[in-house]
Amino acid sequence: MKNILLFGLSFAVTLLGPIHSVIETTKSDVKKTFLVVYRPGPGWLQDQPLSAQPLKEHGRYMLSLFKKGSMKLAGGFADNSGGAMLLEVVDESEARAIVAEDPAVKKGIFLYEIHPWKLVAWEKYLHK
């Protein structure tokens, strides 16, 4: 009887271990969307278009965020007034930490605003 009980307990632990792991992973993997709007800061070269701004390090940083999966979309505004980035991260503190490490923000080329963004899944309304 003791062996059957130990076997049952061992089987339950073996079965529930992966399930618990999936539940924990799912909880921590819930991402929130943030829109970051960049505007010219004190380090912005006056009377110069976006393409003339010293943004090489900023571009490398954006690419690293894209590779990590944190940044989904980004680009400059066609009117040279700044740019925007779409982040998918765990929470606002992570979004703020990412933007604070941006070389263009550190150098004052950009000031920024962060907005939590509730995107609408418009596809679900197409067939109603």
Image (cartoon, rainbow, N blue to C red):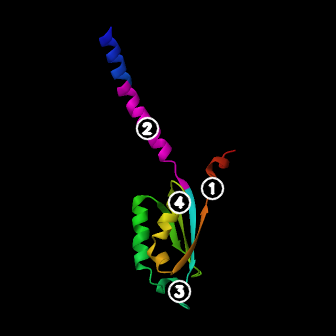
Residue 93 badge: 4
Q: Could you tell which of marks 3 and 4 lies nearer the N-terminus? A: 3
| Of marks 3 and 2, the one in the foreground | 2
Residue 118 badge: 1
Q: CA distance from mark 3 to mark 4?
A: 31 Å
Is 9 rendered above or below residue 67? above
Res 77 visible: no
Q: Which residues are magenta?
A: 13-32
| Residue beneath disc 2 | 22
> Taking 94 as reference, is 63 left or right?
left
Q: CA distance from mark 2 to mark 4?
A: 25 Å
Asked if labels 1 and 4 touch by Cβ distance under 8 angstroms, the answer is no
Q: CA distance from mark 4 to mark 1?
A: 17 Å
Is 56 rendered above or below residue 17? below
State the quadrant of the N terminus: top left
How crowded is the residue under tag 3: few (<14 C-alpha within 10 Å), some, or many (20+)?
A: some
How crowded is the residue under tag 2: few (<14 C-alpha within 10 Å), some, or many (20+)?
A: few
| Of marks 3 and 4, the one in the foreground | 4
Q: Could you tell which of marks 4 and 1 lies nearer the N-terminus? A: 4
Residue 71 badge: none
State the quadrant of the C terminus: top right
Give the image location of residue 22, x and y in percent: 43, 38
| Residue beneath disc 3 | 49
In front here: 53 or 120? Answer: 53
Q: Amino acid at mark 1?
A: Lys
Q: Amino acid at mark 3?
A: Pro
Q: CA distance from mark 2 to mark 1?
A: 26 Å
Residue 121 is one of the magenta-drawn residues = no
Q: Amino acid at mark 2?
A: Val
In front here: 127 or 41? Answer: 41
